[in-house]
Image: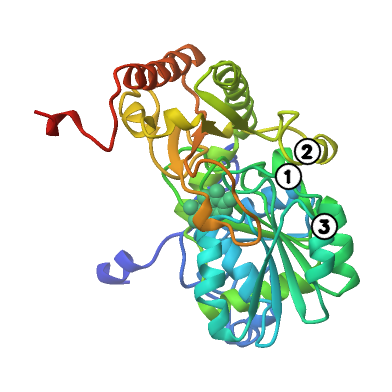
Amino acid sequence: MKDLTRCVITPKVKMEGFDPLGSAIHRASTIVFENAAAYANRLERGPDGYSYGLYGTPTTRTLERKLTELERGGRTLLVPSGQAANTIAMLAFLRAGDKVLIADTVYPPMRDFADSDLPKFGVTVVYYDPTSPAEVERLIDERTRIVWCESPGSTTMEVQDLPKIAEIAHRYGALVGCDNTWATPLNFKPLMHGADIVTEALTKYVAGHSDVLMGSISVSDEAHFLTIRSSMGRLGIGVSPDDASLVLRGMETLGVRMKHAHEGAMAAIDLLQGHPLVERVLYPALADCLGHDIWKRDFLGASGVFSVIFVPEAVEHVSAALDALETFAIGASWGGTRSLVAPMPVKVNRTATKWIGNDLVLRVSIGLEAHEDLMADLQRMLRTIEMRIATGLSRAVPHSAAR
Ligand SMILES: *Cc1c(COP(=O)(O)O)cnc(C)c1O
């Protein structure tokens, strides 16, 4: 053998006795076959075999297996983002003439997809009040292919009665999909409460370090799995083993991170709820949250993401107060180690329900910092608002413009 060839061929080294706790990163596009017949018959290897990198590697299969066990599902598929999990879960099943019912409180990019793309394919989109199974009953018909849920709802945190909605949907032969990103499969298992499809933005809590994007789709039914898998193959969608390995690593600490974040959220909520500048905190673990009883019945815990509604006099000062924060960062996405805040508009994202009150809801994600530092930061934010109100500062008349 010439050296040029030696450079190309990878020698097999002994694997026996090498038994690490973590999972290896297996990179591959090409997978080679022992002979021509094996190559010709590669499709017979089925969904558990290996035939091409896009369709799975030992690294991605390891993550899929872990998620399947947590979701109590039959199968899991990995996709490049949480948003992709939602859109692919829909596209794989929809055809022209179908109708979908979507919770009014759905993740806003999902609403954008439903409004911008689904009508192009001849799919009718109808939004429903997430807290009203009766409305689902009224809107559903034989054309309805999917009833899409997200519980609790994005920003406003309404918890849905998934078993009730699933009972209605299944009577009409519709599938039920549920975006479970807030709860993670540790705190809610939608497949055990009637959903046919559950999606997760692994980007958030499961990966947990704000450095990787990934989503998952889990199902109980093998036929649904094959439908999604073949759609993904045709669309050319898969994930890199390097990214999957980051998610696998992050996931090992999911339980302790969620516990710390939840405890921090409870401390922060205590502080905020008692403050005269705060009108209301939205969080499924609070008794006045819409669907709190359903949360108690169906969920196993709460994460560290909640929303804050300020009293009307405070609203115009919130932006300036966010700039005073030192430990919290301002940014979208959540579920990482760093605590985040993001002001969210609600009215533009509601059509089936009416959002009454202020259109500024502050989404807060508690991270892994010391609770004391976070509480001091929230106090700083509240003091900034108080000071601005007391001195009559207003965003409308910046003091630099006053002579
Ligand atoms: C963030 C988020 C997504 C999207 O996840 P990406 O990985 O950022 O695309 C989907 N659903 C919910 C509820 C989310 O919060």
Image quadrant holding the N terminus, namely bottom left
**Residue where numbered disc 3 is placed:** 133
The residue carrying pointer 2 sits among few (fewer than 14), some (14 to 19) or many (20 or more) residues within 10 Å by Cα, namely many
Q: Quick check: is the Cβ at mark 1 less than 8 Å away from ligand 1? A: no
For disc 1, the marked residue is 159
Instruction: Classify mark 3: helix, strand or loop.
Output: helix
Q: Which amino acid does label 3 sit on?
A: Pro
Residue 13 visible in the shown view: no
Count residues near mark 3 (Cα–Cα under 10 Å), then give few for <14, some for 14-19, many for 20+. Answer: many
Q: What is the tally of numbered marks visible in this picture?
A: 3
Residue 18 in picture, x, y percent from top left: 56, 41
Mark 1 or mark 3, whichever is nearer to me: 3
- Asked if one can make out residue 76 in the rendered structure from this viewpoint, the answer is yes
Query: What secondary structure is marked by label 1?
Result: loop
Mark closer to the chain start, 1 or 3: 3
Q: Is residue 7 left or right of residue 318?
A: left
Q: Given this view, does label 2 or label 3 mark the residue nearer the observer?
A: 3
Residue 361 versus residue 327 in the image, above or below: below
Position of the C terminus by quadrant? top left
Left/right of residue 376 with respect to residue 308 in the rendered view: left
The disc placed on residue 295 is: 2
Task: Label 2, secondary structure: give it.
Answer: helix
Of the two numbered discs 2 and 3 on the same chain, state the one appearing first in sequence: 3
